[in-house]
Amino acid sequence: MIKKVLFLFLIGITFLEGKVDFKTRSEVAILINADTGAVLYEKNSKLSCYPASITKVATAVYASYLLKNWEEMVEVPSEAIGSITYEAKKRSNYKKPAYWIEVGSTHIGLKKGENLSFSNLMGAMITASANDAANVIAYHLGAGDIDVFVSGMNKYLKEELGCKKTTFRNPHGLFIPDHQTTAKDMAIIARAFLKDNRLKELGSTYSLSIDKTNKQEVRNLISKNKLLNKGSFFYSKAIGIKTGYTSDARHTLVAAAEDKGRCLIAVLMKCEEKEDLFKDAKEIFEAAFSEEKSSQLLLKKSSRSLKKNSKKVA
């Protein structure tokens, strides 16, 4: 009888991340690890808030989910570029279409009948925060009905991503009273955004050009994310993603940063001053990246005996 003893070693390294000791100027905040989803810091993170243009992060995620061919050409319909003043919208008790663009809000001046690629529309929406581009994307993917797109997006966010406290009324984020989300849900959406390489690249783009169309010449667009701009708020570890502002929402930001293989996501909402938004982002990222990560070695040893009959060979 030959007795064999086998040893099985199961070894794993787990990195433990502690909570970040920090206090934001923003009233609502959350910081998570983009890879694991671990929450490193939170402040009122489950409070329902108006998101403003960080809504477009969700629009981009759902749009990219629906359409894989970003070179598809899209025609701008009149329905997607209709506008209304903030005062008129308020006087109507918000009964007008929720996707109508507010006069004076951010856009790239799309014209009825203009043809441009889906890729250019996505770039305009994320980099330049163009509300008209967001509407055209939603119209195109909603089979000619922006509300159909928004309804599908809400279902996708709740059922596929688990964003239970998010309800959007339009694809761009202009104020409607029941257009709300939470910092926690936005962090979940941002994780999905970063998993899409095309979206991740767009989110980190500071400037881009929209190709010449049948209606307009080349347009050069600039991001409002000062973490990407080599100025006073530049942050070399930043990789995007999106800013937002309305007078009702105040300043909002979904930001991501990478350092030494770690990727973190910060969501900041209800911030009074735009400068404080970027200060919060830089400082909370640095606080987290400077925290030492401890490693834990997991080791399991087991043994078993195998019995085997041996025959004597003459």
Image: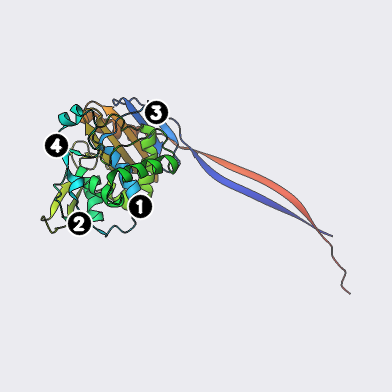
Q: Nearer the viewer, mark 3 or mark 2?
A: 2
Residue visible at 21% across and 31% down?
246
Q: Quadrant of residue 283?
A: top left
| Residue occupied by mark 1 | 66
**Which amino acid type is shown beneath numbered disc 4?**
Val
Task: Identify the residue position indicated by label 4 in the image.
Answer: 103
Residue density around tag 2, few if under 14, some if 14–19, many if 20 or more, within 10 Å: many
Q: To which quarter of the image does residue 40 belong? A: top left
Q: Quadrant of residue 212?
A: bottom left
Task: From the viewer's side, name the closer residue of 7 and 144.
Answer: 144
Instruction: Identify which amino acid the numbered label 1 is placed on.
Output: Leu
Residue type at mark 2?
Leu
Left or right: where 76 falls relative to 255: left
Q: Residue 46: which numbered mark, if any?
A: 3
Q: Residues within 10 Å of mark 4 (few under 14, many from 20)?
A: few
Choose the circle earlier in sequence order: 3 or 2.
3
- First reached walking from the N terminus: tag 2 or tag 4: 4
Q: Which residue is mark 2?
A: 116
Q: Is residue 154 above or below residue 200?
A: above
**Tag 3's secondary structure?**
loop
- Quick one: label 4 or label 1, which is nearer the N terminus? 1
